[in-house]
Image (cartoon, grey):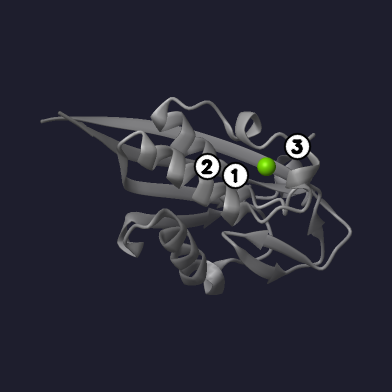
Amino acid sequence: MTSQLRIGQGYDVHAFTAGDHVTLGGEKIPHTHGILAHSDGDVLLHALCDALLGAAGLGDIGMHFPDTDPRWKGADSRAFLRHVRDLLKVSDYVIVNVDTTVICEAPRLGKYREAMRANIAADLGINITRVNIKATTSEKMGFIGRAEGLACQAIALIEHISG
Ligand code: MG
């Protein structure tokens, strides 16, 4: 039996638009703006999908869920994440851990963090201790600092078991 550890990273950004909430980590969070996106614009889950796909050598989220496809209009990004989990599973990968950093000036995410972790753990079928969510600001600099949008970085470690 051989085991191979593989790592992947993901990044996503979306602009704010008129609205009253953002969806992050599958949680609807009240905010002064909404997110401009074809799907629900969940940057956290999009970055995480890309990290997992990257680790498995399976391309990126745009290949699997093109934003030109009407099927994904307003899509729940948790369905993307569960689909990515299934892709990894059929390729004999198990998820070791995932770590994420949301970058925005607002909203504050602290009180939603545990619910977001729980959503991700449930969708990936892993223990919540294997999921981490961090949040930081851009110190008022650049497009994030001017509150024009928000971004997320993610990294995932997966293990391939064969033989
Ligand atoms: Mg996106």
Rendering coords of residue 55 (x, y %): 40, 31
Q: Are marks 2 and 3 in contact (CB under 8 Å)?
A: no
- Residue identified by numbered label 1: 46
Residue type, numbered disc 3? Asp
Q: Residue furthest bottom?
A: 111
- Residue identified by numbered label 2: 49
Task: Decide: few, some or many residues near mark 2? Use Cα within 10 Å; few <14, some 14-19, many ≥20.
Answer: many
- The numbered disc on residue 23 is none
Q: Are marks 3 and 1 in contact (CB under 8 Å)?
A: no
- Indicate the quadrant where residue 14 lies: top right
CA gap between label 2 and label 3 equals 15 Å
Element under label 2? Answer: helix
Q: As displayed, is residue 115 above or below residue 157?
A: below
Q: Nearer the viewer, residue 47 or 78?
A: 78
Residue type, numbered disc 1? His
In the image, taking residue 74 as reference, residue 19 lies left or right, namely right
Residue type, numbered disc 2? Cys
- Residue identified by numbered label 3: 67
